[in-house]
Amino acid sequence: SSGINAEYGEFGDEVEENLREMLPICKEILAEWDLLVNEDKTEFVRFYIADKTDVDEKGEPLRGREPWRKNVSLGSKLCSKADIVHRCILANVAFEKYSKVWLEKSRISLYTKVKLYEALVTPVLLYNCNSWAGPEKILQKVDVCQRNHLRQIMNCTYPRNISNKDLYARCGVTPLTERVAKSRWKMLGHILRSDCNSPPQLALSFTVESMGRMRGRIGRHQISIFKTILSDLNKRNMNLRDLTDLTELRHIASNRNHWRNLFSF
């Protein structure tokens, strides 16, 4: 047998040399399961926040444009801001692909067009959205992209006007930012119900436990998926300050219906 390529294996360490030494070991171990490692496609990505004085080869400020932000994992860019902008571009391409459908005025009803839009374009726009941790201004780009598409479907472009509220009502859909929040809440429930030794559970436990004893970075606070989750919990008068709170959340999430209903709290 020629073997199958091992896709999306990821390892992390503070020292890059350790990861480079690990690569041939992983290649040897995975070969025992007839899995192949393509060293030419293996990437070593360094995560960091550039200082204000850091510049690139052109002398332009590097902060906010660090190379890792453009790296892709499981189909999404590692930086939420970059991924959201990229998703909007891909959604526009998908929307234009079916332009003849949207422009049809008599044979295809608005209801059918919106159903097709939800099936063909919305999934492109919301791919992996449960892991987004972008500022509100960036997340609004998703709603703007959606509204632009819906207005074209309804043929309500300038100078014909329709309010955002009426647009959503006529099309029978909700703003995508609401779906992003719901998807993130659903993902958190899945993590809390998973095995305590699963990677996401271990990562969550480590983050919660280290909050009180490990010092964070100095400077402007960065938005992260964990901080976004804490904000979601605070909106529902729930806390995640220590392992006791985490244990309580696991108990709450064990009831799927109750956890689902908490989203509309």
Image: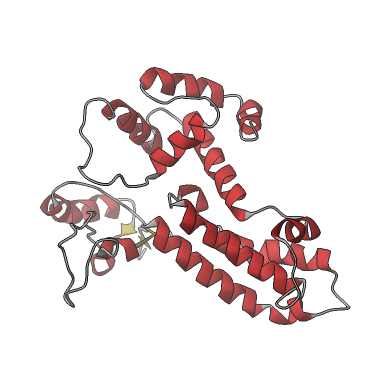
* Residue 225 rendering spot, x and y as whole percentages: 41, 44
* Residue 142 rendering spot, x and y as whole percentages: 55, 60
Q: Is residue 42 visible?
A: no
Image vertical order of residue 166 relative to residue 227, above or below: below
Image vertical order of residue 246 relative to residue 152, above or below: above
Left-right relation of 236 to 15: right
Left-right relation of 65 to 128: left
Q: Residue at x 49, y 24 (%)?
A: 250
Q: Is residue 152 visible?
A: yes
* Residue 243 rendering spot, x and y as whole percentages: 36, 21
Q: Residue at x 69, y 61 (%)?
A: 118
Residue 207's image quarter? top left
Image vertical order of residue 58 relative to residue 242, above or below: below
| Residue nearer the viewer, 235 or 158 | 158
Left-right relation of 184 to 71: right
Image quadrant occupied by the N terminus: bottom left
| Residue nearer the viewer, 39 or 254 | 254
Extreme residue in the right direction: 106
| Residue nearer the viewer, 62 or 93 | 62
| Residue nearer the viewer, 34 or 19 | 19
Image quadrant occupied by the C terminus: top right
In this figure, which colouring scheme has been used for the structure? secondary structure
Residue 247's image quarter? top left
* Residue 187 rendering spot, x and y as whole percentages: 52, 40
